[in-house]
Image (cartoon, coloured by chain):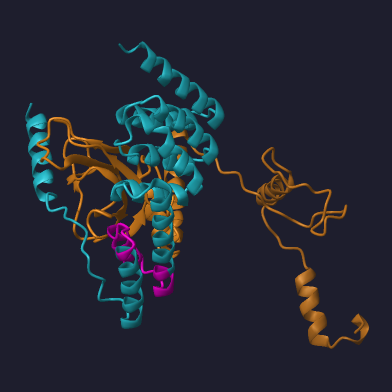
Amino acid sequence: MIVRLLALAFAAASITAAAGAQAVDRTLPAQLSVPTRATLERLIDSARVAGLPIDPLYSKVREGVFRSADESRVVAAVQRLARDLGDARMALGDSAGAEEVTAGANALRAGLHPADLSRLREARRPRSDHPLTVALVVIADLATRGVPAAMAVASVNELVTRNVSDGSLLSFRQNVERDLVGGRSPASALDARTRALIDDERRRP
Amino acid sequence: MSEPDSPRWLKEVTDELRRDVIVRSTWRTRLLEEVARARKPSAHDTVDERFDDEGELGHQPERHHRAITLGPLAGLAAATVLVALGAGVTYMAMSARGGGSADRQRSVAAAPPQLVSGAPASSEREVVRFELSAPRASRVALVGSFNEWNPVATPLSRDPASGKWVVSLRLPPGRHVYAFVVDGDVTADPAAPRAADDDFGSTNSVVLVTAPRT
């Protein structure tokens, strides 16, 4: 009982202590040289004018500084991310939100093609206002774990077409991940989990 | 130099050395027995006398192998000391290489980040609990897109109940990229999915936060 109380008190204290998680700081770190900061400011301004989300770009700069990367490497990473964000925006359409575009950029980085994003957008037509963020995150995560991007896209496309909920998509990802860790092949895991989820959806009233 | 040409003093010394040493017969017998015993190969002697040092067949000059016999307790104690010495040497070698590898080995999977059920979420954020099992670490922190990759912003605390390093954060919905800093060494969360964008040489982890439940 005392241990449980202590654990509860500890959990409450740790949440309070960490409650200061804040929005992205839109300034460039002072550790960077003046020419590098100028280059990054130009890149980020261009992204802003193009209507792209810029918080991921600031975060990328901060990560590079934290990891003591060369300034040229930081600039290259931000350039690449800005390009991916632009491609994702083009593929997903102007109505896509910042989270959706950021997830799309990461999916491109994981090996998807812009055409894959466009097909995913077409697949959700029946409920076109629903963001694709979770679907894109699921595809990117699966590709990162060694599932061929085309297979991941095909499975998630089918699920999105059938209006599978975001919660079910996240469970699907976890189940496939578990199967892969257990030694199942990506094709077998994706096929079995996709069919199981579709069957579940069919049984629902 | 032949003996007839030797100086007289040398001849006298040689004669003296050649003279039989008078000892008791029992001492001589015991001495000869000891010499014979020492030359007899023992059952524990593993020297292969067929080969010389160059690997050629021949007489092996003289090798003395001594078998050491230990009792069970003494053997256990010796094994413990050897294991401890081996672990110490390995740790020192890994530390000498920069310490990073050793730190990474201290971290093991605990659990992926989880939404804390029943925790007071705000209207826009969910409470997410991160945890890492790193029993030998003295300091663990969380860095990521949600705290500007600031290694001092989000320290983890050791949970007195489980012994794991934990922290709970209020995070907005979406995909967040993060890593742990274990005694100054950056490492991905062993229990979570990896991010695709490893621009700076090592991968990060990803936490997915869904919209707060209403």
Which chain is painted in cyan?
A
> What's the residue at 31%, 43% (across, down)?
B207
Q: Nearer the viewer, residue A85 or A188?
A: A85
Residue B66 relative to residue A31: left or right: right
Seen at 39% across and 56% down, the residue is A85
Q: Is residue A66 visible?
A: no
Q: Main secondary structure of the magenta part?
A: helix
Name the one closer to the observer, A52 or B132: A52
Instruction: Give the camera-side residue of A97 and B179.
Output: A97
- The span picked out in magenta is A49-75
Residue A28 in the image: state x and y as whole percent: 26, 71
Does the segment drawn in magenta span residue A70? yes
- Up the image or down, A33 lies above or below A138; here it is below
Quadrant location of the N terminus of chain B?
Answer: bottom right
Question: Eyeballing the image, is A69 above or below A33?
Answer: above
Residue A43 showing in the rendered view? yes
A193 up-or-down from A27: above or below: above
What is the x, y in percent for residue B62? Answer: 74, 56
Closest to the observer, A61 or B57:
A61
Q: Is residue B23 magenta?
A: no
Q: State the image coordinates of residue B202 (x, y, percent, origin top left).
A: 43, 56
Q: How many marks?
A: 0
The residue at the point 71 percent across, 50 percent down is B35
The C terminus of chain B, quarter of image: top left
On screen, residue A29 versus residue A81, left or right, reads left
Position in image of residue A137 (x %, y %): 37, 41
Q: What tint does the image give chain B?
A: orange
